[in-house]
Image (cartoon, rainbow, N blue to C red):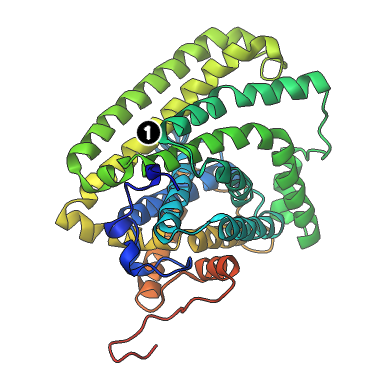
Amino acid sequence: MTSSVRPLANAAYGPSTSHAPAHLQPVSPDERIHGLDLLRGWAMFGVLWSNLNDWYGTEDPATRLDRGLAWAQGTLIESRFYSLLCVLFGVGFGIQLVRAADRGLDIRTTYLRRSAALLAIGLVHGLLIWQGDILTMYALVSFAMLMFRDASPRRLLVAAALSWLIAPEIVLATRYMAGLHYMVPRTDPTTAYWVLGHGTWTQIQAIRAGNYLDWFQRWGLMLYWSILAMFLLGLWSVKSGFLRRAIEQPATTRRLLGWSIVAAGLGLGLARVVSVLLHPLYGDPGWWTEPRFWYRRRLAAAGFDLSAAGTALVYASLLLLLWQTRRGGRVLRPLAATGRMALTTYLTQSVVCTFLFYSYGFRLVGRVGYSGMFGITLALFGVQMAVSMWWLRRYRFGPVEWLWRTLTYGAAPAMRIATSDGAT
């Protein structure tokens, strides 16, 4: 390993080499970076809120509150929390690199098992529980991250820029010139929502699997590269040492907040200008696929992505500044606990929400407005925070996190927290 992975190899960011075991193993609770757990918990709240608005047939706004929440969905919520999760995943990979470097070990075999296990969980989730799964894409992108394990921070930034700016256009041009057609037929949204709310389990399963596969054929190759760019930025933050400074040093966190506000403002402004300039093209069905419109697409995508990433980092910076105070740390502890169980939290949200909205549950699809979705978000996430606090007083991992670690390391880690007399 090169020296570029060393800045975090101490304190809470990784074990010291003097007492490091000779093999990789799950991170113990006292090794965790709790500021990252906080950000994961916040991302889980936003992902739940955004997914409810996007995937369950939200009614058109009928009240002033609904209209305000609908505006917030498009301007302050959409893609903001998903972007934060992508960066945090890259951070997790970077910290794995540090731990492996401390032990002088090759991470490839363990990391490939970790990615394969996440892929299996994502496939089960997307095909059998909820078609909006993102874990499958995270797993597929994570395989590519191995190519960058020895890259310097500068090369990571260059690779992230190329993945964001250039690669999606190459994918679009290739698809256009090859005349590729969609293989999975798309179900009309009105029909799909009716089946989800009134159909049998078999009919719902057909819609679920069809929508899951349809998303990948339409968007998978393009979004692969933007997600890879965010993963690489997360890895860069670890290798450059910026992650530690942003979490531990309020001055750095405040600078991050300032630059994030600027990025979000520039992105929103660019998106607005581009929207006006491109309005005449919206009637042309080929403007989002034909190579001749490539620079217009890049401007539109750049505005949206910059505003989304900037807003996500504004949220993260404000949370970290509050977390760095004694009172803020106490108040935000339940949110950090939920972040420690992020995978369990995410899957539980899918199980509960599909039961609330699909025909085998309360059949609420298409019958809830934006204010109702926000109420469901607050109620469900509040319960999840309380359960997470209760669970982590007794167990070291969330149940799905425990399963993921078991599949990754080939052995089941101890689950219960040892008591003062040594019993478990």
The residue under the point 44% across, 26% down is 306
Q: Could you tell me which secondary element the residue under label 1 belongs to?
A: helix
Measured along the vertical axis of the image, is residue 290 above or below residue 361? above
Q: Residue furthest left?
A: 326
388 shown above or below 287 = below
Q: Residue at left 50%, top 41%?
A: 231
Task: Tell me the crowding category of disc 1: few under 14, some 14 to 19, or many 20 or more residues within 10 angstroms, Cα based.
Answer: many
Tell whether 395 sits left or right of 224: left
Q: Is residue 57 visible?
A: no
Q: Nearer the viewer, residue 11 or 213?
A: 11
Q: For the image shown, how many numbered marks are present on the structure?
A: 1
The structure residue drawn at horizontal position 31% and vertical position 40%, both measured from the top left corner, is: 242
x and y percent of residue 140 in the render? 64, 47
Q: Is residue 158 left or right of residue 32?
A: right
Percent across and percent down for residue 390 are: 37, 74
Q: Quadrant of the C terminus?
A: bottom left
Q: Residue 205 appears in which quarter of the rendering?
A: bottom right
Q: Is residue 13 left or right of residue 149?
A: left
Q: Is residue 165 visible?
A: yes
Residue under the point 51% across and 60% down? 343
Of 335 and 8, which appears nearest the observer?
8
- Where residue 256 sits, quadrant-wise, is top left
Q: Which residue lies under the disc numbered 1?
A: 311
Q: Amino acid at mark 1?
A: Thr
As drawn, 290 above or below 127: above
Q: Position of residue 160 (x, y in %)?
A: 50, 31
Percent x, y of residue 147: 57, 42
Nearer to the camera, 164 or 62: 164
